[in-house]
Amino acid sequence: MYSADDSTRIWEETTGLTWTGTQTTQTLARGATEQFYGTGLRLGDWALRDKVVPIAIDNKWRENNNASPAPFYLSTAGYGVMRNTWAPGSYSFTSPVSTRHNENRFDAFYFAGDSLKNIISDYTDVTGKPFLAPIWGLELGNADCWSTYNTNPDVGPVGRAGHMKTPDVIAYADGARNADMPSGWFLPNDGYGCEYEDLPYTVAELKKRGFQTGLWTERTLANIPWEVGTAGTRGVKTDVAWVGGGYQPAFDGVQSAVNGIEGNSDARRFVWTVDGWAGTQRNAVVWTGDTYGTWADMRWHVPAIAGAGFSGFNYANGDVDGIYSGSPKTFARDLQWKAFTPAFMTMSGWGTTNPSSGYADKQPWRFAEPYLSINRKYLKLKMRLTPYFYTHARAATDTGVPTVRAMALEFQNDPVALGNDTSGQFMAGDAFLVAPVVSDTSVRDRIYLPAGTWTDYWTGKAYTGPGWLDGYQAPLDTLPLFVRGGSIVPMWPQMNYAGERPATPITYDIHPRGSSSFTLYEDDGVTRAYKTGSSARQRVDVTAPSTGTGDVRVDVGALTGSYTGKLASRGYEFALHVAAGPSAVTAAGTTLAKHTTRSAYDSATSGWFFDPADRSGVLHVKLASRTTDTAFSVVATGVTLPAGVPRPRAPPPSRPRAGRPPPTARRRRARTAPPPTPSTATPAPTGTPRGPARPSPTRSPSTWAGRTWSTA
């Protein structure tokens, strides 16, 4: 395959296609430094050179297995390949590269592009763009069985206090709100044989408290018209007892769940599933199955979830602190970084000693101090970041480029970022570099900062990349988190669920550095009206010096478009991270009052206050409520930008491991009966794992998530 100039080779077969009667194999030459990504929700490192990856369902959910395989990979040579099949296979990224599927046919799509993002966008043009989750789906979900099992009374939570009938979940919802803990939805029947009763009442009472309700299913969706249309449920979680055979039956099962939600309400699809395939990204969140609350499992979850984005999965995650074992400390650490993923969930009730008397609750508000406050800290931050993550969710729906990005996806031209030396960190959108702590330590080493300025979110200390950061102090309440220079991050006022209060004032948290922009996206957050244009956008442009002292100008455009619930007016606040304050600040041409204390600033309706003690210097600017359909500008005159501390470029030592992985996980269905043996028959190629081809959106590599910047 050659590029458009007919002279640059993109890929070349070393031998022709081979058939054995049961398998079809393609063999390609491998470049000297060529790297490979994709293959679905692979549980482990995302850089695949020299690795053999199963494109197959096994439901073991251990490191190097594949929880939701996708017959697709992409290469730094500038191409991607999707095998159009439902058959399992195996991809060997050795030399030569060998990709096979267990069928006597060959059908493939090839994509060529000048960036990994372009290739993912083209791939999702064929297989479907990621769905746009309801805005409450970005909030923490909680699954457990609040009911008696409809099975052997010696199995399940019969007699478990607080879990006898479905309405018992309401007390847990009250517990969350009493603990001032953000959270957005419950699955109250998650357990084998777990049924429900008084569902309409339960749904209504949870909704009064700001929670939506979904249901877990192990068997059938026969009652979903009533559950959604009458009782008011809005989500579905599938499980291996139903979709565990994988491939087309699992794909079709997820589609039927989507049809059940959208065919009986005006709501959007919100489905969680295991055993996805190419195209599942347009219908569901994929999760990593039944895993453990251990440091070892946490370690490989970081690259697994970041790497899933290479296959178009915008929503991929694992249960916070796993389903088995766990501890207050591993829960707090796991929740910290998963709060920077689009969708996340806790799974309770199986405990550290299940099925005996453990039944440990894993909702974040059920822990004692200091863990309670740590959990609250990160959930509140995630809640304030809702407009940022929701804008990125819409960008993923438009372009296919995921919110959570492996370093290679965001920094393709940085050779250090291309390999697994950076697989223990990721980008949350284009602004945040997240470096989770995945061992029992308070010091984080081996954080790689690409070219540019990176500011410690907690202290305001600025670093200049490219280079490595070792010895970062990360006590239990601190997630290593850095903000990219030039970032513009919209933030809501504090609330515990979407709609608890109006989204005003909106704060733009800005790290000025050169020229940059961000386009905020809003809609009603729950219905499918956005598909017919009911939405609004607001572009914010920042112009600043690249270094040193100068003026910072923030141009805020009108909030253009309309949707039900759009604010006609709102307040605006700006937090500009600068090392020294301005001589003056103007808004819409009017000089704003300077306040000399934070309390005076907080009590005023408008003005500015520079606080040198707030994260090494933050200029706070506040404007009175104004109409959203008019543009305006804010200018801070003569501010000084932070000077970054250069980082050493020396190559890091070999990666430490977090410990031996735990014993092989038992499948969840084994709690009530021995699991049936999964079918090994090769599915016939009776369909295609995509849908109708989507029209390619207008896009540019510089506008992937509503933001552009230039710091040159």
Image (cartoon, grey):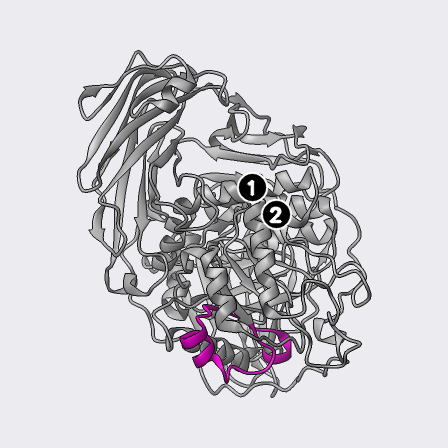
Q: Is residue 666 left or right of residue 594?
A: right
Residue 274: x %, y % from top left: 58, 69
**As drawn, 249 above or below 318:** below
Q: CA distance from mark 1 to mark 2?
A: 8 Å
Residue bearing the label numbered 1: 378
Q: Is residue 158 above or below residue 77?
A: below
| Left or right: 400 as drawn, with respect to 142 | left
What's drawn in magenta, residue-wise?
216-242
Q: Residues within 10 Å of mark 1 (few under 14, many from 20)?
A: many
Q: Is residue 688 visible?
A: no
Q: Is 233 colored magenta in this rendering? A: yes
Callout 2, which amino acid? Leu
Q: From the viewer's perspective, is residue 282 above or below residue 320? A: below
In front of the other: 210 or 37: 210
* Disc 1 residue type (three-letter): Tyr
Please name the residue that numbered disc 2 is placed on: 335
| Residue 88 falls left or right of residue 63 | left
Residue 58: image quadrant is bottom right
Report the residue at 33% width, 36% height from top.
505
The quadrant the C terminus occupies is top left
Residue 113: image x %, image y %?
38, 57
